[in-house]
Structure formats: C-alpha cells, structure tokens
Amino acid sequence: MSGKNTKVNFNLANPVQFLALGFGSGLAPKAPGTFGTLAAVPLFLLMSGLSPLLYGSLVFIVCIAGIYICGKAASDVGVHDHGAIVWDEFAGFFITMFMIPVSWQSVLVGFILFRIFDIAKPWPISVADKKLTGGFGIMFDDVLAGLFALGIMHIIF
C-alpha cells in the first residue's frame, strides 16, 4: 500500500508512532508537513541555547533515530512516507536553523524556506524522494531540503 494521504489508523499510544507523528501534529487534516514543522519550532527554541557541537550532535541523533522511527511507523501502517509522518520535518527544520541567530524573523524565514524546499522538491531532493525507500528515504529528502534552506539562511543571516 502506498500514498502520502491514504487513510490509516495511527496509534498515538505507541511511542514510535507518537514521535513519527510529531506528537500528533502530523494528524492535521490539511498540510500535515506544515503543522509538523510548526510543532518543531518550540523544540528548536529549547535547543537553540545549546553549543553548536551539542546542537549538531542532537540533530544527528534526531536524524539517525528518524530512520528507524519513520520506517517503523510507515511499516506499521503499511504506507511508505504517509503524510502524517512528520518526524522528518522536525529534522529538516532543525538542520535549517543550525547556527542561525535566533529571532522571530530568522525562525519565520527558516520555516518558510524549509517548507518551500520540502514541498517543491527541486533536484536532487526530488530524486531522493522518488528513488529512496524505507526510513532512510523518508528522512533523506527532508535532510536535503533542510540543507538547501540552511545554505540560504546562512547567506541571509
């Protein structure tokens, strides 16, 4: 079974699905990726005071754990990269904001840039989205979108 918006029953009591669904934010009926990214903002703000080494290490852990979390949640419901799985959006937004001075303007611009790259999927993000499978595939296109947005953020800020 495949499809980004196929109707399935997720279980928020399952810790892996709870994380994959961005604490429930991915269950928004419209634009779950945008709501997932929005749910990542408070966590980013909590992490923003960390040293670059600690922040980067935490983001690395989020990405590596995300391969399992997203892959397992997708496998549990039988749908690859279901739209409600938004842990990858958390990772992508955290990457976008790496070593960016925190202000409401930078958070807003980072949010918008990440969403643009995640939705538009320019090359090579589109290739990763189409060709890669499993938890790695779910995560990797958002990691790339985050890296693209990060590059622009460092030019701007």
Image: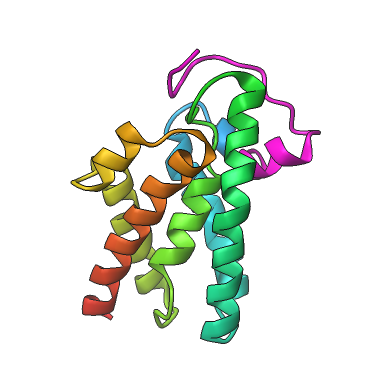
Left or right relative to 27: residue 31: left
Which residue is more in the foreground, 96 or 105? 96
Measuring from the top left, give residue 62's x and y in whole percent.
59, 59
Which residue is more in the foreground, 21 or 142? 142
Q: In the rendered image, which quarter is residue 100 located in?
A: bottom left
Q: Main secondary structure of the magenta part?
A: loop
Relative to 130, is 93 above or below? below
Part of the protein shown in magenta: 1-25
Relative to 5, is 118 above or below? below
Q: Is residue 6 magenta?
A: yes
Extreme residue in the bottom direction: 51
Residue at 27% in and 49% down: 116
Left or right relative to 129: residue 8: right
Residue at 43% in and 24% down: 4
Left or right relative to 28: residue 120: left
Q: Is residue 157 magenta?
A: no
Measuring from the top left, give residue 102's x and y in whole percent.
45, 79
Residue at 33% in and 46% down: 118
Q: How is the image coloured?
A: rainbow
Extreme residue in the right direction: 13
Left or right relative to 8: residue 94: left
How many numbered callouts?
0
Residue at 60% in and 16% down: 8
Residue 8 shows in the view: yes
Residue 49 shows in the view: no
Relative to 144, is 57 above or below? below
Measuring from the top left, give residue 92's x and y in whole percent.
44, 56
Measuring from the top left, give residue 13's x and y in whole percent.
81, 33
Q: Quadrant of the C terminus?
A: bottom left
Relative to 86, is 1 above or below? above
